[in-house]
Structures are given as structure tokens and as C-alpha cells.
Image (spheres, grey):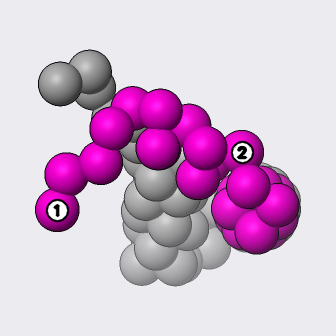
Amino acid sequence: MNISKSEFIDWKSGLVTEAFFEAAEERVYDCMELLAQSAGLDSDQDNFYRGFIAAYREMQQFSVEDE
């Protein structure tokens, strides 16, 4: 399925989408806080939090290029 850049912009500015991205940002912040408090105690947990943060950041930066 192809969507235009203007359709993507419309979707991204929708109320539900904005609420979703706001919740995602809160989760990133929460993980960063957890990582800051517990870094070095469990390397697997550190890696999980780092991966979680990276995945959410990638999702937040997703864009649609002009056709």
C-alpha cells in the first residue's frame, strides 16, 4: 500500500496519532530513567532498555518520502 506524503502528514497530525506518539515518548523517558538508575547492574536488562529506546526513537522518526 502506498500513501502520499500529505496523507502521512494528515495521519501524523490526528488526535489519536498525537496521543500515541506522546505515550511513546513517555515510555522512552521512563526507560531512560530506569536505565539511569540501574545501569550496570544487569547487562541484559540494560540492553533491553537500550533496544526499547532505540526502537521507539526509530518509530518516532519514521517519515514518508515524496513519490
Alpha carbon distance from label 2 to label 1: 20 Å
Describe the element under mark 1 as helix, strand or loop: loop
Residue 32 lies within the magenta run: no
Q: Is residue 5 left or right of residue 20?
A: left
Q: Is residue 23 left or right of residue 53?
A: right
* Residue 35 found in image quarter: bottom right
Residue hosting label 2:
13
Residue hosting label 1:
1
* 32 vs 11, nearest the viewer: 11
Q: Is residue 5 left or right of residue 18?
A: left
Q: Is residue 22 left or right of residue 53?
A: right
Please tell me which residue is depicted at 82% across the width and 61% down the height of the picture: 15
Q: Which residues are magenta?
A: 1-25
Q: For the residue marked with disc 2, what is the amino acid?
A: Ser
Circle 2 crowding by C-alpha within 10 Å: few under 14, some 14–19, many from 20? few
Q: For the residue marked with disc 1, what is the amino acid?
A: Met
